[in-house]
Amino acid sequence: MPKQPPIPYDFLPEVPWLTVESDDVRDGERLSDDHVFDDWGMSGGNVSPHLRWSGAPEGTRSYAVTCFDPDAPTGSGFWHWVLFDIPAEVTELPTGAGSGELKGLPDGAVHSRNDYSIKQYGGAAPPPGSPHRYLFAVHALGVDALGLDPDTPPAVVGFNITANTLARGYVAPVYEI
């Protein structure tokens, strides 16, 4: 299995690479207003993007999907989307699965609260200045379930995701105001 290309930040352990594609977002391209937050002075659609993945290693028992902004001026980044316990047979989420009415969200999947303190996708809302990267990552996990609940803080979920990751891939669009 091929190795993961360099990630936008270096604190995650290197693991084999998943192929992650989207009909909605692309590496290095600007997020459309559909995927921007609809609060905090922003007026976007707050719709989670379509994601499709392949290349999971043998032993994959579930997936997690996250969106993380490593450029947020917090000292610890910003979690925009924290979804886990996605069944292993699922390899695609439609546009909007993580937002609004959660149509297309697989049975058993759990949304943890993000850094907006909501339990769904929360779109981009950076302060004015340089572009921020939005790392939409899919993590192939070696466990059926993380054993966490929707109120678990995103950093704790991230810790558990990382501890159980067999492979990961991402697509990283950008956004600035």
Image: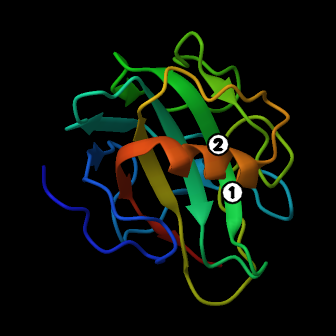
Residue 45 can be seen, yes or no: no
**x and y percentages locating residue 88 in the rendered image:** 38, 20
Q: Residue beneath label 2, please?
A: 82
Is 117 on the left or on the right of 36, as rendered? right
Q: Quadrant of residue 83?
A: top right
Is 150 situated left or right of 57 in this image? Answer: right
Spot occupied by residue 4 in the image (x, y as percentages of width and height): 25, 62
Secondary structure, mark 2, is strand
- Judged left or right of residue 33, residue 92 is left
Q: Quadrant of the C terminus?
A: bottom right
- What amino acid type is highlighted by mark number 2? Val
Q: Residue at x 48, y 66 (%)?
A: 12
Q: Position of residue 46 (x, y in %)?
A: 67, 45
How many numbered marks have been drawn onto this rendered protein structure?
Answer: 2
Residue shown at 40% from the left, 23% from the top: 61
Q: Residue furthest bottom?
A: 129
Specify the color scheme. rainbow
The amino acid beneath tag 1 is Trp
Residue 45 numbered mark, or none:
none
Q: In 3D space, how far apart are the residues under numbered discs 1 and 2 (Cα atoms)?
A: 7 Å
Q: Quickly name the residue at label 1.
A: 79
Which quadrant of the view contains residue 127? bottom right
